Image: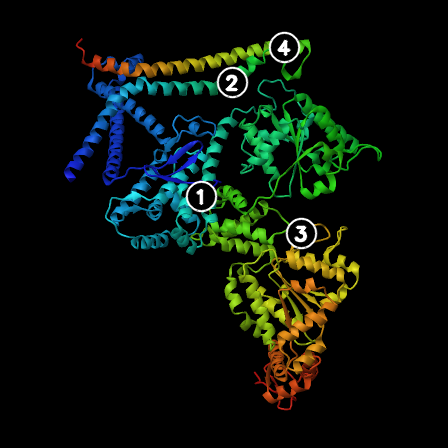
Amino acid sequence: MLKSHFLVLSSKILIQFIWNIIFFPIWWYSLGFLRFVSRIISFWRSEQRALGLFVWTRNLFVPMYGQHDFAGRLMSFFVRLVQILFRGLAMLFWVIVGLVLILSWLALPLAIVIATAYQFLEM
Amino acid sequence: MMTELEFENNEANGPATWWRGRLIFWRHSMSRSAISLQKLKKIIAHVLRIIVVIVIVIGWLSLLAWMFFHWQELSMAPIKLLLFWENRDPLILVFLLSLWFDLFLVYRRSEEMIAKIKIDHRKWREDYKHSDDSYNAAGAASEYLEKVLADAFLLASKLKQSEVSVMHFFRALLTDVQVQNVFVRLNVSASSLVDKIERHLLDLKVLEKKPYLSDELREVLILAFIDSVQRQQEGVKPLNALIFCYQRSPVLAEILYDLDIDADKINNVCEWFHINRKLVLNYQSYRRSAILKPGSGMDRAYTAIATPTLDNFSHDLTLAAKYGRLELCVGRKKEIDSIFETIESGQGGILLVGASGTGKTMVINGIAQLMVAEQVPKFLQDKRLVEIDVSRLVSGASPAEAEARLLACINESARSKNIILHIANIENLVGISAGGEDSLDLSEVLSEALSRDRVICLATITSNNYTRVVEKTALGESMTTIGISEPNINQAIQILESKVGLMEGKYKIFITYDAIEQAVILSDKYLHDKFMPAKALDLLQRAVTLSAKASRHNPKNSICSKEQVALAISEMTGIPAQKLTESESHKLLSLEENIHHRMVGQEEAVTAVSSSLRRARAELKDAKRPIASFLFLGPTGVGKTELAKTVSEVYFGDEDYMVRLDMSEYQAADSIRKMIGDVDGTLGYLTEAVRKKPFSLILLDEIEKAHPDILNLFLQLLDDGRLTDGQGRTISFTESIIIATSNIGALYIQEQIKASTDLNLLKQELIDNQLNKFMRPELINRFDGIIVFKPLTKDNIFQIATLMLKGIKKRLSKKGVGLKADRKGVQKLALAGYDPKFGARPLRRLLQDRVEDKVANKILAGELKRRDTVVIGPNAEISVIKGREL
């Protein structure tokens, strides 16, 4: 009785262990990838909020500091344009960083396989 | 927080209840093997994790070793480091293989994080459309709860009991760290609790069947699940189940009751832990968003205009909140929501009205914090909350200048469009006006600007200032008032709990739950002119400071318990500390004995007063009346006042706790002012005395002499236990004993006692035919007891003489002089001083004449020195025995 119990138990655990190892690569390219991408997206969102890029673009034609005269509007427009340019560049940098990270996620297992295979290749 | 849910029972799932559109049940298949499997799995997972980490470390070490061996090549061409994999080297191979373990670790961590979230809160919103209508809540159990359940199951099967009851579960709960902490805060020793529960478990029936979860336990678990959904938790934790265990198991409730724990206490302590968890979560998300709030006065789009004048006379609350300088606001969601709704409905001016100390400023702070976290309606997003400093606005300026400044500030904030104004204590603006009598004052300037410029302004004012200064003015009419009410006892306890963490950290003191509860209860009882929660917080702060001071001398004792709180309040109010903690029952049981230590005779009166006091306290009657109230009737000199003094000493600890009012001084109708004060600021003698010392005995001497209007005052006092004084403050008399004395029917009493009439008959006759001529029957009825004092007997007088001589002896002993009295001499003195008409009064005079005066003469003449003894001989004559010369 006790022995059969033990057998059932250990076989259950063994099956789960093996399933873990088989499932892991599949997870990497499915669920894991989606979760990683969603994290990168929320990272982009918070960077966008920090830079206020959308706020600046939305208000491109709204004068700054309540200066509603023509000169104020004109100056505001150009100042905002310059601001948007620099903030856009900063945002672009973070977008590239994120993309590189996503690509690395996809490439990493393959790279490891290739590099390991290379170790065994004859010159 | 949860309305009572109805459970239905069906065969398949056991008890179940409908909640948010689904039938919730708890089905947990449990067996020893399943529990062992779980345990084994956990151990294997743990071992696996350790192996993975070791391999990862070995891999990276290999890479470092390879770099070390090829240092020279690498320093010549660093690019080679990136192409490390091109080198065929066992070290590189080890590193590459270990990288798989890195990825595996990422996979496991991610899965574990997801597995922790057992409740999908999107599916539990009120409006969610469910595809299935039943739900097994067992799936939502956190890892800790699973463990507790497994322990409970193993415990039941070890005791060979087939039903896993709430008690088994509770015993297992006590192994959970958080639940243990709850009992630590409650100052309960875990071991005694465990003992009691195990003793109960051993008494349960033994049935050798496979154990199953009892219906009550499943109900507890379902309720715990609902609680954890309402609290937005990731899973059901053991702490969620604690209060429901108490509710569903009468035996457990009894056991905890013996340890002085009731439902409120458990609930408040559990709430404490939930509040702390929420505070941490809120704080984290708040800090994250605070970084993004602009630090300059500008909005994010830079459309606002600069506000130099306003900046000069104000400070920015959102900025203070951004840098974490404001205290966190707890439990004012309802008020804040109603403020938002009012603004949304187009009302620009909002006035928060509440007594000082109820938390008006905290509500404003809370809004500032919500604005920083941007968790506010759209019209408040990306705005600043700016407090106008009224004192700076008016200081050093003529009224006209102040008005100009205020207008400039309002103007700027109107044009800037990103400013919400806050004015604390707005009453300070009333009454400052420029120009002649007809010109507007500052508050009117503000109220006009509010309606014209659509500026949003949040102002605060205390309740009595509101009715006194603002209510009928233009300002009061142009603003919407929102009441900030005083929290009730449990809310106040929870507010204090949210602040305790900071105090504990600052003073390195552990604060027990009892201390918090006591701070709220005692401040509610004794600090009548301040308001909750500020007064309770003040008191606790004092108690903590006291404990911190004490722990400096004795570092082991760094606990603030209810004794320290009692000590702190006695420092604040003068009420003796031990009176607050000493059990009243002991004092009440030995009342007669204690009274007779200084009171001779009048057995009936003493018994009547004592039993009346006991009855008043034990009856658990309405706490909104004085402790007790008596009317003492009897001839003069029989000990009415003496008994009042004695009660004051025995019950309150000192004669000084007696407030004596000679009612003959209140014969005119307008003397009511003398008693309760008036609007002009004259303080009432009675109300002021009780306000300062709520814990006191009030003696109304010769009550029949007072004006009928004043007697009416006592009607209310005896009934509600409170009076309103001339300034409109409510004075509570719920901690006082009221004793009125009267000589009405003194002659009648003497006659009837001589004729040995029954005392009860005599009393009834007095009430029916004598008292009602002076006092209204409703007043007579309101006294807890009417007590008739009998004339003194010769025997009484002898005992009183002995007592009085004892007093003289005590005074003489201070001068180093002794006193000896012959029994016969004392009897002679007593007989000479006896007068049935005047009671013990003539005796006092007699002792003055025959003893004290003579002793005084001898002292002055130098015949009586230290170590001498005064002797009262058999004929009551005074002589001196010379003491030993040194």
Q: Amino acid at mark 1?
A: Cys
Residue of label 3: B730
Which of the 4 image quarters holds residue B351? Answer: top right
Q: CA distance from mark 4 to mark 3?
A: 65 Å
Tell me whether the residue at label 3 lies in contact with that at label 1, contact meaning CB atoms closer than 8 angstroms.
no
User: Which secondary structure lies at badge 1?
Assistant: helix
Q: Nearer the viewer, residue B783 or B728?
A: B783
Residue of label 4: A75
Chain letter of disc 2 in the image: A
Disc ID at residue B270: 1
The label nearer to you, 4 versus 3, is 3
Tell me whether the residue at label 2 lies in contact with that at label 1, contact meaning CB atoms closer than 8 angstroms.
no
Q: Is residue B860 visible?
A: no
Tell me the residue at 28%/16% (across/down).
Answer: A109
Q: Position of residue B250 (x, y in %)?
A: 40, 51
User: Which secondary structure lies at badge 2?
Assistant: helix
Q: Position of residue A116 (x, y in %)?
A: 22, 15
Residue of label 2: A51
